[in-house]
Image (tube, rainbow, N blue to C red):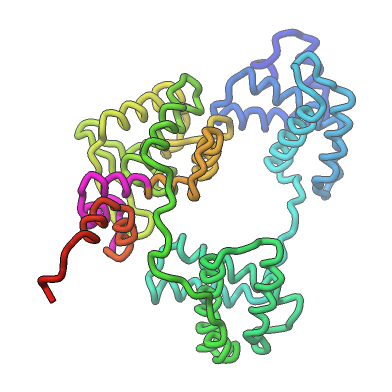
């Protein structure tokens, strides 16, 4: 592997004579198989040579993050990286990143231990019950168990088991946690809803008192009390126009934002899109709904199709991954945090919509369709709503129709 990167004899001998030459060769071959460019591979080879020199390896012992940090500081002091235009902080980051990846590849990295909850078995049984008995989606089950684990992480160091739990413990948890979090009424209601469901399940199996779930009231929420919180249509247009550049990140992100803004796709539906879902011959795009798991076919509009084609031809790396949207740097993997991509760009444009993620673009699309006199049934079908109750909130955004309702003279009816 070193022969492919270095042609000068002294450079080649330096890497061959360095510590752990065989391990470094294996790692570089692995990184090369991911499609990393030769120039970037050369830089990795230089860094991990210093890692091998500065981080002592002891047989049978793993390397800790503290050891890597100490070696990174020594590397930054020795190699000021003037020839590469990097400062000391950037040198530390580069060293830490490559050292972590190399030691993880060799299985030498000491990962932080994750404390297992005492009631993890109960949570697993509850997850299985929600999947088999209620038919909930995996993402829904994961989100519901999130707050349960947060509560039990707070509760277990204070009490021994669920059998002695009471509603006052839930009140104490909310009081203590809300001091720093400042949760909204909707967030508190969601937390209490998940805890009530969990305690009902635990009580049915004799693990806690049956009265706990009934003793957890939630804050009062009013149906449709808020308007849709997404950006305005003209703000979405500004967002798309800001990405009409030749930068690889802009080309990729513009294709993803168009899928959210034109079809109202959820973030997981965009990041989960696969190459076989694009039917170029029939000009269609097949999307699997994140919640219902039902397939939904859309006509591939020219603006969206051209944006995706430009990304596939100019930006997307050539690798074995089947997902459409991948990271720009190796190791290439599916892009996950679409919310960060959209919110960061909206914030940079000064767009202060209450909801600045991909879901806000769904709201913007629904309000636009409503202004074009589309029915709630059509809007619900486009957004993938199984119930019309989920679409009714957008009726509040049709102010022109509401004005006509307000001007109706119902005197003759009575």
Residue 374 seen in this snapshot: yes
Name which quarter of the figure residue 299 lies in.
top left
> Which is nearer the eye, 320 or 187?
187
Residue at 31% x, 49% y: name it: 366
Q: Nearer the viewer, residue 41 or 291?
A: 291
Quadrant the N terminus occupies: top right
Residue 367 lies in the magenta stretch: yes
Looking at the picture, how far across and down is residue 140, in whole percent? 45, 63
Question: Residue 331 appears at what percent x and percent y?
Answer: 58, 34
Q: Is residue 185 left or right of residue 304?
A: right
* Prevailing secondary structure of the magenta residues: helix
Is 309 colored magenta in this rendering?
A: no
Residue at the far left in the pictured view: 412
Q: Is residue 31 above or below residue 204?
A: above
Q: Position of residue 64 (x, y in %)?
A: 81, 47
View extreme (front): residue: 411
Whether residue 251 sits left or right of residue 52 in the image: it is: left
* Position of 292 relative to 342 (above/below): below
* Rendered view: 131 above or below 1: below
At a point 57% along the width and 30% down the height, the residue shown is 329
Q: How many marks?
A: 0
* Near-viewer residue (288 or 226): 226
Q: Is residue 140 left or right of residue 4?
A: left
325 lies left or right of 80: left
Percent of width and height locating residue 314: 43, 21
Magenta stretch in the rendered image: 364-387
The C terminus appears in which quarter of the rendering? bottom left
- 408, 12: nearer the viewer: 408
Tell me where residue 112 sits by quadrant: bottom right
Q: Is residue 63 visible?
A: no
Residue under the image location 89 percent in, 31 percent down: 74
- Give the farthest residue toward the top: 8
């Amino acid at each position: 592997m070193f022969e492919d990167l270095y042609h000068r004899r002294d450079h080649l001998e330096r890497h061959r004579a360095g510590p752990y030459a065989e391990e470094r060769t294996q790692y570089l071959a692995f990184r090369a198989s991911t499609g990393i460019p030769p120039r970037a591979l050369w830089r990795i080879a230089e860094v991990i040579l210093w890692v091998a020199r500065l981080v002592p390896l002891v047989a049978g012992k793993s390397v800790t993050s503290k050891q890597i940090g100490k070696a990174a500081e020594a590397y930054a002091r020795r190699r000021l990286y003037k020839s590469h235009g990097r400062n000391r902080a950037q040198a530390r980051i580069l060293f830490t990143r490559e050292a972590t990846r190399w030691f993880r590849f060799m299985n030498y990295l000491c990962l932080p231990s994750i404390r297992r909850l005492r009631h993890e078995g109960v949570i697993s049984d509850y997850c299985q019950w929600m999947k088999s008995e209620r038919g909930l989606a995996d993402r829904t089950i994961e989100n519901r168990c999130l707050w349960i684990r947060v509560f039990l992480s707070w509760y277990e160091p204070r009490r021994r088991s669920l059998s002695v739990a009471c509603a006052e413990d839930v009140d104490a948890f909310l009081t203590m946690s809300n001091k720093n979090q400042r949760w909204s009424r909707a967030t508190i209601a969601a937390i209490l809803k998940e805890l009530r469901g969990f305690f009902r399940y635990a009580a049915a199996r004799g693990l806690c008192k049956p009265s706990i779930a009934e003793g957890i009231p939630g804050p009062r929420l009013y149906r449709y009390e808020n308007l849709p919180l997404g950006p305005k249509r003209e703000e979405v247009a500004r967002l798309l126009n800001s990405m009409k550049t030749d930068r690889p990140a802009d080309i990729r992100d513009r294709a993803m934002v168009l899928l959210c803004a034109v079809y109202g796709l959820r973030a997981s539906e965009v990041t989960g899109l696969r190459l076989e879902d694009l039917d170029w011959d029939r000009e269609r795009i097949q999307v699997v709904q994140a919640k219902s798991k039902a397939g939904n076919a859309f006509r591939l509009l020219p603006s969206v199709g051209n944006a995706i084609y430009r990304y596939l031809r100019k930006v997307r790396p050539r690798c074995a991954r089947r997902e459409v949207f991948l990271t720009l740097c190796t190791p290439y993997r599916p892009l996950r945090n679409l919310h960060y991509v959209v919110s960061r760009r909206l914030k940079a444009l000064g767009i202060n919509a209450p909801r600045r993620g991909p879901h806000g673009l769904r709201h913007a699309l629904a309000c636009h369709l409503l202004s074009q006199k589309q029915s709630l049934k059509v809007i619900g079908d486009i957004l993938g709503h199984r119930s019309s109750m989920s679409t009714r909130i957008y009726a509040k955004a049709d102010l022109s129709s509401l004005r006509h309702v307000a001007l109706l003279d119902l005197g003759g009816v009575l």
